[in-house]
Image (cartoon, helix red, strand yellow):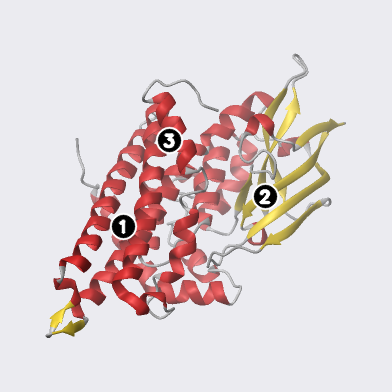
């Protein structure tokens, strides 16, 4: 069992950390409050090869795996720049297309995903069904050689920044008449596809949207894979990378908050010239949060290692555990940092309260802590399915 990164991974971590710190949390907050996007950071990360670390070299990527992409997600978050679209575009969309797309789809989309010139967002969640693909209401039906997509999606991240959206719909199996999932790469400017921005109590430069698909027509080659049989494997292909990279972003955010609080408490002096961090009532909660973040990082490393080794079932268990642990640890770390800083913790200047909404959302999305506990109870503890 080896807990050390390879020399190349260490170099990647150092380089991404340096890039993130050059922009910093102030840049992230400024963009979010102005209604802008972190375009400059995204393009520079793409130019330097960090967005495509998990994409094969033949398509312009780094040829690494989810381990490398998790490093990118964590280090940018640890610099105060947690970029949600890293999860959506390189982790989910690139993985799905690379593993289950056609040769033409790989050639068309992966180079742009690798260098950051293209973004593909992901649309599965619906107002009624949530992310339960068995009950999705978005339907795709054939019309000659084309497909027509109709339905609604919600909480779809970054549609305003992306050229395409990966839509999960249900199609009818001609042999059985049953509905089965299928994925389609849909241009965000396609006729019949409209969006409405959701107002969220989260400070983020990445927006959330409702999507409406009203007989959106796409050609046959928009279907991911060679046939409808690719739908279910393609859908599941994106789940483990999503959970692992979301967890990495949470762990990085936790590290950032603890670092900010530790710097403050080590230098802030109020009583008899001693730093407030010398008091256990201040130091112990921060130390506890640091332990929880480090435990989450270990599970993230395990999950990514298993995934990159092709051990999908084990990676699914570890990935869900990592997401749970990181979500809890990030929320604890940010809340503890705010408390340690006192009134300063609630100011924009000190840069921790600005993350409260995001880390709270991390306990809900992309899968809630309760559904992870259901998963663990069923698949680890052998309990009957409860839902």
- The image quadrant that residue 139 belongs to is top right
> What distance separates the C-alpha of mark 1 from that of mark 3?
31 Å
On the question of residue 23 being in view, the answer is no
Label 1 vs 3, first from the N-terminus: 1
Q: Are marks 2 and 1 in contact (CB under 8 Å)?
A: no
Label 2 vs 1, first from the N-terminus: 1
Report the label total: 3
Q: Residue at x 32, y 67 (%)?
A: 337
Q: Residue 214, image x and y in percent?
A: 83, 46
Mark 3 lies on a secondary structure that is helix
Q: Residue 144, image x and y in percent?
A: 87, 31
Instruction: Tell me the quadrant of the picture where the C terminus can be found.
Output: top right
- The image quadrant that residue 125 belongs to is top right
Q: Residue at x 65, y 23 (%)?
A: 229
> What distance separates the C-alpha of mark 2 from that of mark 1?
34 Å
Mark 2 lies on a secondary structure that is strand
* Label 1: how many Cα within 10 Å (few below 14, some 14–19, many 20+): many
Residue under label 1, please give it. Answer: 13
Residue 373: numbered disc: 3
Q: Nearer the viewer, mark 2 or mark 1?
A: 2
Mark 1 lies on a secondary structure that is helix
Q: Residue 147, image x and y in percent?
A: 80, 36
Q: Nearer the viewer, residue 96 or 367?
A: 367
Q: Residue at x 72, y 39 (%)?
A: 222
Q: Residue furthest top?
A: 175
Q: Nearer the viewer, residue 126 or 233?
A: 126
Q: Nearer the viewer, mark 1 or mark 3?
A: 3
């Amino acid at each position: 069992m080896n807990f050390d990164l390879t020399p190349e991974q260490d170099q990647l971590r150092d380089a991404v950390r340096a890039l993130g710190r050059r922009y910093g949390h102030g840049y992230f907050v400024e963009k979010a409050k102005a209604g802008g996007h972190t375009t400059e950071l995204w393009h520079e990360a793409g130019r330097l090869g960090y967005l495509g670390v998990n994409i094969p070299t033949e398509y312009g990527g780094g040829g690494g795996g989810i381990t490398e992409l998790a490093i990118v997600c964590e280090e940018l978050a640890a610099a105060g720049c947690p970029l949600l679209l890293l999860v959506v575009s390189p982790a989910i969309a690139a993985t799905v297309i690379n593993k289950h797309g056609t040769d033409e789809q790989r050639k068309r989309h992966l180079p742009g995903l690798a260098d950051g010139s293209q973004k593909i967002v992901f649309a599965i969640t619906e107002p009624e069904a949530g992310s339960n693909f068995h009950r999705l209401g978005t339907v795709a039906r054939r019309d000659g050689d084309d497909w027509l997509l109709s339905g609604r999606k919600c909480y779809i991240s970054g549609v305003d920044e992306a050229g395409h959206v990966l839509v999960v719909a249900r199609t009818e199996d001609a042999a059985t008449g049953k509905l089965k999932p299928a994925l389609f790469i849909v241009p965000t400017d396609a006729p019949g596809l409209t969006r409405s921005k959701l107002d969220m109590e989260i400070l983020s430069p990445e927006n959330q949207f409702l999507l409406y698909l009203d007989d959106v027509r796409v050609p046959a080659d928009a279907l991911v894979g060679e046939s409808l049989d690719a739908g279910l494997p393609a859908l599941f292909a994106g789940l483990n990378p999503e959970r692992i990279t979301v967890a990495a972003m949470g762990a990085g955010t936790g590290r950032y908050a603890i670092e900010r609080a530790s710097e403050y408490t080590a230098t802030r002096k109020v009583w008899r010239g001693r730093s407030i961090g010398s008091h256990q009532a201040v130091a112990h909660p921060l130390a506890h949060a640091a332990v929880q973040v480090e435990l989450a990082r270990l599970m993230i490393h395990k999950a990514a290692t298993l995934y990159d080794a092709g051990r999908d079932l084990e990676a699914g268990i570890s990935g869900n555990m990592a997401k749970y642990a990181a979500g809890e640890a990030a929320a604890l770390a940010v809340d503890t940092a705010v408390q340690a800083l006192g009134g300063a913790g609630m100011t924009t200047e000190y840069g921790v309260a600005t993350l409260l909404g995001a880390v709270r959302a991390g306990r809900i999305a992309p899968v809630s802590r309760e559904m992870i506990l259901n998963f663990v109870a069923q698949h680890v503890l052998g309990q009957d399915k409860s839902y």
